[in-house]
Image (spheres, helix red, strand yellow):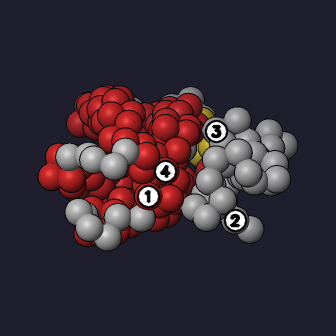
Amino acid sequence: MSLCRLDLNQGEGTSSRQLCRYGCDCAPVMDQSMVSTISTSGPGGSRSEATELPLGALAAMKGAHASKLALCEMLEQIADSLPNRLDRAQCETAAKLLTSAVARFHRFEEDIVFPVYSACAVGDNGALQTVERLRFEHRQDEDFAFELSEQLLAAATAKAFNAEMLGFMLRGFFTSMRRHIAFESEHVIARLEAVG
Ligand SMILES: [Fe+2]
């Protein structure tokens, strides 16, 4: 089953698949009848209120990460093609994905995954601060994605564009996003897998 995978060849709005409200095709595994209960232990081993993580949510998050890494790869290809081998259609596709997909994946992580991660980390102030930092990075990446998409659309349509600035923005964005994904994989996903 494909989980939260963008069809990078089709672009936004052309897929006939049924999408969940976060814009991915994980709806079947997000059904409320398919929930698992994760019981969390508080400080000193006491049981805290149980939290629920929909079955398939971690797989969906990994799928979202894979999709974002594929987007990063596309952005790196564009950066490497500057200034003379630019694929303008690829720029247009990447611009659409930046404005449509990135924010939806962030909403999915923040609405479904982070609350459970926070509940599992009761008494761990470091983990709670981590969630706040990840949310802040989401906002930064979404703002950056919007600015980058405008530059990519300009490159896709304009005869003249600032290749040096575009390359700088591309490398800054995919480097930051890859670092964010690596951290979430090593800390958020690993912790939820450990308690699941
Ligand atoms: Fe994230």
Residue 12 appears in view = yes
Q: Which residue is mark 1?
A: 88
What residue lies at 34% left-to-right and 49% top-to-bottom?
159
Q: Secondary structure at mark 3?
A: loop
Q: Are marks 4 and 1 in contact (CB under 8 Å)?
A: yes
Find residue 42 and report its horizontal and vertical position in percent. Answer: 41, 35
Q: Secondary structure at mark 1?
A: helix
**At label 1, which amino acid type do we have?**
Arg
Q: Secondary structure at mark 4?
A: helix
Q: Which mark is residue 107?
A: none
Q: Earlier in the sequence, mark 3 or mark 2?
A: 2
Q: Earlier in the sequence, mark 3 or mark 1?
A: 3
Find residue 120 and report its horizontal and vertical position in percent. Answer: 45, 40
Q: Which residue is mark 2?
A: 2
Picture quarter with the N terminus: bottom right
Q: Which mark is residue 22?
A: 3
As measured in the structure, the alpha-carbon distance from the residue carrying label 3 to the one carrying label 1 is: 28 Å
As measured in the structure, the alpha-carbon distance from the residue carrying label 4 to the one carrying label 3 is: 22 Å
Q: Earlier in the sequence, mark 4 or mark 3?
A: 3
